[in-house]
C-alpha cells in the first residue's frame, strides 16, 4: 500500500430529508461544512443537480458563497459545475467573484453531464447538446477569462483576471480522462456511482498525463459513499435511507430522503440486484474498523491521491458523527504510512 498522505474531502448534494424545510437543509449543510473545517477535511464541494425534489444543490455558486462565508479555511468548490448548462463568461464572473471574496479557498470543478434529465437540460439551455460537444473549447474560454493577458481582450471577466481559482476536470466515463491528462489538470472521477469505468479512466489519465504549469504529475480524486456508525448494524440501519434513494433513482421514482428503517428482507434483496450492486461497489458502510478496512483496500487498489466522500444520511447529527469518525479513520490511515 502507498505511504503517501491521502487527502479527504466532502461531496455535498444538499439532500432534502422528508418532512424538512429546504432552508433547514441549507443550514445543516453549513453546520456540516463548519465541522469539516474543524476536522481537517480539505474541501467541501457542492454538486449541481436540477429538477429533483431530493437534491437542493441547483444554484451551486450561490451555495458556495454561503458555505465559504460561514467557514474559515476549508476549500469550497463545485463538484461540479455542469458546464454545458452555463455560459463560460458567466462562470468566470461567478468564480472570479468568489475567488476575490475568499482568496485561495475556491475550487472550480467542471463536468460535461447535464446533472438532470434531457428535457430539463434543454429548458436550462436550448443548445445544450452543442455546448456539451464543445466542452474542451468552453474550458479554454474560462481559462482565457482568468488569464492576466485577457485584459487586452474585447470581452472580459475583470474580476477573474489573475485570480487563483484552480480548475478540476470531473468525469463519470473515460472521455474526460483524455481531456484532463492533455491539459495537465487534476481529475476527479464519480466513483460513488460510475464504478465500472473508474479503473480504466484513471489508467488513461495517468498514462497520457502531460505536465502543465498547474500540475507536474497526475492528481486523482474519487467519489465514494461512506456511512460510519458505532456498529455495523447501526450503520446498515442508517444506510437504508441511502439505499432507498438509490433505488428510487434506479427505478425513476425520485423522492425525498426517507427516514432510516430496519433492513427488511425485501430491501436487502433489491439491494443485491447485480446492477445496484455494481453502482454501490464503492459504498463503504459499517463501524470504524469495518470502514477503515474497506477504505484502505480502495486506496491500495486505486492509488488515489484524495477521497471525496458523499454520506447520504437522513439525520444531520448522524451525518456529522459519520464524517467525524471518518476523519479519525483517515488520520489513522495516514499515520500508519
Image: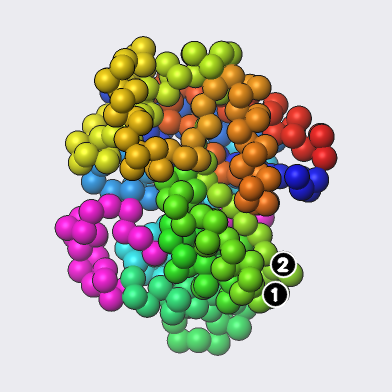
Q: Residue 211 bears which disc, if any? A: 1
Residue bounds of the magenta highlight: 104-131
| Residue 66, label in figure | none
- Residue 87 in the magenta stretch? The answer is no
- Indicate the colouring scheme: rainbow
Q: Quadrant of residue 228?
A: top right
Q: Position of residue 78 (x, y in %)?
A: 49, 52
Whether residue 62 is visible, yes or no, is no
**Most foreground residue, 190 or 276:** 276
Q: Position of residue 306 (x, y in %)?
A: 64, 48
Give the left or right position of residue 214, taking residue 26 as reference.
right
Q: Position of residue 139 (x, y in %)?
A: 47, 73
Mark 2 nearby-residue class (10 Å; few <14, some 14–19, many ≥20): some
Give the side of residue 295 with respect to residue 153, left or right. Answer: right
Front residue of this view, candidates 196 and 243: 196
Residue at 45% over, 76% down: 136
Residue 87 in view: yes
Marks 1 and 2 in Cβ contact (< 8 Å): yes
Q: Is residue 120 magenta?
A: yes
The earlier-in-sequence mark between 1 and 2 is 1
Q: Which residue corresponds to the image point at 62% horizontal and 36% vertical from the top-left? A: 295
Which part of the image, by quadrant, shows the C terminus? top right
Residue, disc 2: 217
Residue drawn at the location 65% of the way across and 29% of the way down: 292
Specify the quadrant of the image occupied by residue 120.
bottom left
> Is 325 above or below relative to 146?
above
Helix, strand, or loop for circle 1? loop
Amino acid at each position: 500500500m502507498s505511504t503517501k498522505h491521502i487527502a479527504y474531502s466532502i461531496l455535498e448534494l444538499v439532500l432534502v430529508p422528508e418532512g424538512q424545510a429546504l432552508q433547514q437543509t441549507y443550514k445543516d449543510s453549513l453546520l456540516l461544512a463548519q465541522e469539516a473545517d474543524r476536522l481537517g477535511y480539505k474541501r467541501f464541494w457542492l454538486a449541481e443537480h436540477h429538477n429533483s425534489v431530493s437534491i437542493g444543490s441547483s444554484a451551486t455558486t450561490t451555495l458556495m458563497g454561503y458555505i465559504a462565508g460561514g467557514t474559515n479555511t476549508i476549500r469550497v468548490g463545485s463538484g461540479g459545475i455542469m458546464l454545458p448548462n452555463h455560459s463560460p463568461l458567466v462562470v468566470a464572473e461567478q468564480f472570479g467573484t468568489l475567488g476575490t471574496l475568499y482568496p485561495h479557498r475556491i475550487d472550480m470543478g467542471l463536468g460535461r453531464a447535464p446533472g438532470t434529465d434531457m428535457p430539463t437540460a434543454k429548458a436550462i439551455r436550448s443548445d445544450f447538446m452543442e455546448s456539451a460537444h464543445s466542452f474542451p473549447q468552453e474550458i479554454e474560454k474560462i481559462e482565457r477569462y482568468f488569464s492576466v493577458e485577457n485584459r487586452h481582450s474585447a470581452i472580459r471577466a475583470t474580476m477573474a483576471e489573475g485570480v487563483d481559482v484552480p480548475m478540476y476536470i470531473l468525469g463519470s466515463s473515460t472521455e474526460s480522462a483524455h481531456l484532463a491528462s492533455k491539459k495537465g489538470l487534476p481529475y476527479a472521477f464519480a466513483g460513488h456511482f460510475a464504478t465500472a469505468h473508474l479503473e480504466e479512466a484513471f489508467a488513461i489519465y495517468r498514462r497520457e498525463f502531460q505536465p502543465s504549469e498547474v500540475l507536474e504529475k497526475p492528481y486523482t480524486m474519487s467519489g465514494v459513499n461512506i456511512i460510519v456508525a458505532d456498529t455495523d448494524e447501526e450503520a446498515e440501519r442508517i444506510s437504508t435511507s441511502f439505499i432507498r434513494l438509490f433505488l428510487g433513482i434506479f427505478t425513476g421514482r425520485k423522492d425525498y430522503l426517507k427516514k432510516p428503517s430496519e433492513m427488511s428482507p425485501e430491501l436487502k434483496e433489491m439491494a443485491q440486484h447485480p446492477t445496484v450492486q455494481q453502482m454501490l461497489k464503492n459504498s463503504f458502510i459499517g463501524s470504524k474498523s469495518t470502514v477503515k478496512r474497506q477504505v484502505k483496500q480502495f486506496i491500495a487498489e486505486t492509488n488515489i491521491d484524495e477521497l471525496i466522500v458523499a454520506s447520504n444520511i437522513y439525520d444531520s447529527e448522524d451525518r456529522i458523527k459519520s464524517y467525524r469518525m471518518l476523519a479519525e479513520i483517515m488520520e489513522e490511515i495516514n499515520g500508519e504510512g
